[in-house]
């Protein structure tokens, strides 16, 4: 066991432990280290008094400085409002056109719009705004409900098939699922729609589908198939397809009549943010 | 360096003064004494009069004047631009120097200035020794000023030594307190003047005193007050000996043909005390009065030859010349001289001075090249700059008719002091149409106005009709022009042709 004895060479006492014939000198801790240690202890005690430190059953020790990260965030957000005050106030009163024409206001709206888009819209429409199958591409010049600044603003405000009383609403019937048309008729209609967009199609099928299209589709998509933005009916003659451009995609859409939902953002955003978002989307879509 | 000093001189009574710099003393003594470090021995430099002292006063006044007055020089610039001749505007990200203004992208001019300064320092050092250290270095200038103040309160060398040795008394207390108070005052003025280089001086001066100044201003004022007080008041020569890298670097610049403060041992040795009646035959001119040692602000004995501590200030020359005049010997026993010349004379040959040497020629040529490049760079400095960034997401957008649109953000920097209107053109496949947010129309060429001295970012959408799309990647360029100037930056139009349905 341990036996304390003085080392012959240095005269310093050993700890008495011995490992393979090596004994450890029991030198005192370096002064500077000890001072740092006690200084650290003092700092810790002062810290407990000043800052939130110890957890309790229901609460925690608050510290006499009353420091709170939550309160700091609230103050910072308030400061942000003050900083943005002048610009935000102008955004509130300016019309959408005025915002777009004034370079300074336009830049501010773009910045606000970009961050709001990233937080709220990118989930479905993508960070670049190009959408995905079933989610509209907001960067091109094809719009279901209109691509003007006012139209975009309105769509964000009321949503599509949303819970807002004035929400934009359109319904593509599920011709196949609800057995409104036969499978053959739907196959023919698919060829007809392919032909509408200027692609080669089965001429016989197109001929057969003509009366069906006139009876079932014209009301919304129009006789030439160019759609109607007032009803949210898509243009079938262009090269943009919300649910895909292949025959299988088109067939599936006529059969099932899929329709997505876009929420109404009126209660989520204040009017300035709504305007900024509309300006941002409009500008990045090339501005119709 | 082969400095041979004859130490076989007869022992003679001498003043009780010796080199006190710890390093110098350690070199002199074979016994290093106990411990690795010695406490600093205080140095009491004696006031001297003479040519070099006069030059030092003059340089001190000029350099301090430059430092304190520069931020107050007004310089008329148009519009909202600051009217301060020399201003480092961190908030506005500009550096103004009279008619020159630099943007952060032009930091290479600052690098060039530093390189040129270093080369100038090398050249001067190779030619004339550490003139910078002895005359112009802020450490030397402020230390000199602080010693001047010390002398006002506590008297010259002997009085100061007596005062320090004396027990505390009212007399000692008020002198010490007064000295430190004035030191702190100077230090505060030094730190205070520094911050004027970074803000509009008159408005900052007002804001500073009513507590409305920027936090960084107060922080730097306090910091520099502290460093000035400590460096010039209490650390002095220790900054040069232990902290500054320059004394170490200078060894590579100096050679035996560099002019340095030199004790001409060929004339001075063998040294010894001299009686008025005695003659000068068979002995050197050095009367071993130690005046050169008492005058030295670095606490060294120049008669030991060139040494790291010597800042080449020449105060020992003035001190020695005074004595030489008194003992009626020619002045210049200590003088700006070269080791080579002294060595030659000691060997009985005439001293030769060679200013043109390979290293001085090299430094001069390098300095001329860097200076020339700087001047050339400033003369062709473009007044506009263009940066093009292609959108990354989406890289392209296909429109309803098969046309493809690419989005770009271009940044136009207007480095002039007037607002400018730039034309922006897209030089790529024919039929490209440009559009920018806020502008309902589409055009071939856009007009962009950029305020004076600012950068404007512009979003530009370029649309190519389907028949113009011949490849996935199409080479293109943005051309931004004013009536007299034009910049072209290459970019790519991505059509996504390979992904077409």
Image (cartoon, rainbow, N blue to C red):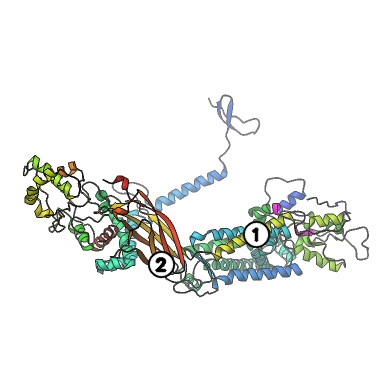
Q: Residue B449: name its quadrant.
A: bottom left
Q: Secondary structure at mark 2?
A: strand
Q: Position of residue A211 (x, y in %)?
A: 7, 49
Q: Is residue B434 left or right of residue A132?
A: right
Q: Is residue B144 left or right of residue B337?
A: left
Residue B252 lies within the magenta run: yes
Per the rendering, the mark at residue B422 is: 2
Q: Residue A273: name its quadrant.
A: bottom left
Q: Is residue A81 visible?
A: no
> Quick check: A99 above or below B29?
below
Q: So how many labels did they put on this image?
A: 2
Q: Nearer the viewer, residue B266 or A42?
A: B266
Q: Is residue B92 left or right of residue B137?
A: left
Front: mark 2 or 1? 2
Given the image, what chain letter belongs to the residue carrying mark 2? B
Q: Position of residue A94 (x, y in %)?
A: 26, 69
What residue does disc 1 label?
A: B367
Q: Is residue B204 left or right of residue B139?
A: left
Q: Is residue B377 visible?
A: yes
Q: CA distance from mark 2 to mark 1?
A: 39 Å
Q: Nearer the viewer, residue B171 or B21?
A: B21
Q: Residue at (57%, 44%) from the top-left corner? A: A31
Given the image, what chain letter belongs to the residue carrying mark 1? B
Mark 2 or mark 1: name the one nearer the start of the chain: 1
Q: Nearer the viewer, residue B16 or B212?
A: B212
Q: Position of residue A260 (x, y in %)?
A: 17, 49
């Amino acid at each position: 066991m341990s036996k304390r004895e003085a080392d012959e060479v240095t005269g310093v006492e050993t700890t008495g432990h011995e490992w393979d014939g090596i004994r450890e000198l029991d030198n005192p801790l370096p002064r500077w280290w000890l001072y740092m240690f006690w200084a650290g202890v003092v700092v810790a005690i002062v810290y407990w008094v000043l800052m939130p430190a110890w957890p309790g059953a229901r609460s925690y020790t608050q510290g006499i400085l009353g420091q709170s990260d939550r309160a700091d965030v609230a103050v910072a957000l308030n400061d942000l409002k003050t900083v943005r005050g002048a610009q935000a106030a102008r955004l509130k009163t300016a019309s959408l056109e005025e915002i777009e024409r004034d370079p300074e206001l336009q830049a501010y709206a773009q910045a606000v719009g970009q961050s709001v888009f990233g937080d709220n819209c990118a989930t479905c429409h993508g960070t670049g705004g190009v959408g995905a199958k079933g989610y509209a591409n907001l960067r091109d010049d094809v719009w279901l409900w209109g691509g003007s600044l006012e139209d975009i603003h309105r769509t964000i405000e009321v949503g599509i098939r949303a819970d807002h009383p004035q929400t934009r609403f359109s319904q593509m019937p599920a011709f196949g699922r609800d057995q409104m048309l036969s499978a053959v008729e739907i196959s023919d209609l698919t060829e007809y729609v392919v032909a509408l967009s200027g692609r080669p199609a089965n001429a016989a099928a197109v001929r057969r589908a003509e009366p069906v299209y006139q009876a079932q589709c014209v009301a919304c998509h129009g006789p030439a198939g160019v759609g109607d933005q007032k009803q949210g009916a898509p243009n079938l003659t262009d090269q943009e397809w919300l649910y895909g451009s292949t025959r299988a995609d088109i067939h599936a859409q006529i059969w099932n009549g899929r329709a997505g939902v876009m929420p109404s953002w009126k209660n989520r955003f204040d009017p300035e943010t709504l305007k900024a978002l509309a300006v941002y989307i409009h500008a990045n879509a090339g501005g119709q | 360096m082969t400095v041979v000093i004859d130490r076989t001189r007869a022992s003679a009574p001498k003043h009780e003064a010796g080199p006190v710099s710890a390093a110098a003393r350690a070199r002199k003594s074979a016994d290093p004494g106990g411990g690795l470090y010695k406490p600093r021995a205080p140095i009491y430099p004696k006031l001297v009069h003479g040519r070099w002292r006069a030059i030092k006063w003059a340089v001190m006044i000029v350099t301090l004047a430059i430092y304190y007055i520069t931020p107050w020089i007004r310089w008329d610039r148009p519009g909202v631009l600051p009217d301060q001749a020399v201003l480092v505007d961190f908030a506005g990200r500009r550096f103004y120097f009279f008619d020159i203004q630099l943007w952060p992208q032009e930091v290479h001019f600052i690098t060039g200035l530093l390189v040129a300064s270093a080369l100038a320092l090398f050249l001067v050092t190779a030619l004339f020794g550490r003139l910078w250290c002895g005359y112009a270095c802020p450490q030397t200038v402020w230390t000199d000023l602080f010693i001047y103040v010390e002398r006002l309160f506590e008297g010259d060398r002997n009085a100061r030594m007596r005062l320090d040795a004396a027990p505390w008394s009212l007399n000692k207390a008020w002198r010490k307190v007064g000295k430190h108070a004035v030191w702190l005052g100077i230090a505060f003025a030094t730190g205070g003047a520094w911050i004027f280089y970074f803000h509009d001086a008159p408005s900052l001066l007002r804001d500073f005193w009513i507590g409305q100044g920027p936090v960084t201003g107060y922080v730097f004022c306090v910091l520099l007050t502290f460093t000035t007080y400590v460096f010039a008041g209490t650390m002095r020569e220790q900054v040069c000996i232990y902290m500054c890298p320059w004394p170490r670097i200078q060894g590579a610049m100096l050679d035996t043909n560099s002019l340095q403060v030199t004790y001409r041992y060929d004339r001075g040795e063998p040294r010894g005390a001299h009686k008025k009646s005695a003659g000068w035959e068979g002995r050197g001119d050095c009367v071993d009065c130690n005046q050169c040692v008492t005058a030295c602000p670095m606490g060294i004995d120049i008669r030991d030859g060139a040494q790291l501590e010597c800042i080449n200030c020449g105060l020992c020359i003035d001190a020695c010349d005074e004595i030489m005049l008194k003992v009626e010997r020619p002045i210049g026993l200590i003088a700006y001289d070269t080791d080579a010349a002294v060595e030659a004379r000691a060997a009985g040959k005439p001293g030769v001075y060679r200013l043109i040497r390979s290293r001085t020629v090299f430094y001069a040529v390098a300095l001329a090249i860097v200076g020339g490049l700087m001047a050339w760079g400033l003369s062709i400095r473009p007044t506009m700059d263009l940066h093009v960034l292609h959108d990354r997401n989406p890289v392209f957008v296909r429109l309803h008719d098969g046309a493809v649109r690419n989005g770009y953000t271009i940044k136009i920097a207007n480095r002039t002091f007037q607002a400018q209107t730039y034309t922006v053109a897209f030089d790529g496949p024919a039929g490209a149409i440009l559009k920018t947010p806020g502008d309902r129309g589409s055009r071939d060429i856009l007009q962009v106005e950029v305020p004076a001295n600012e950068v404007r970012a512009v979003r530009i959408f370029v649309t190519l009709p389907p028949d113009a799309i011949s490849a996935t990647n199409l080479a293109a360029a943005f051309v931004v022009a004013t009536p007299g100037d034009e910049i072209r930056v290459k970019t790519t139009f991505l059509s996504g042709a390979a992904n077409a349905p």
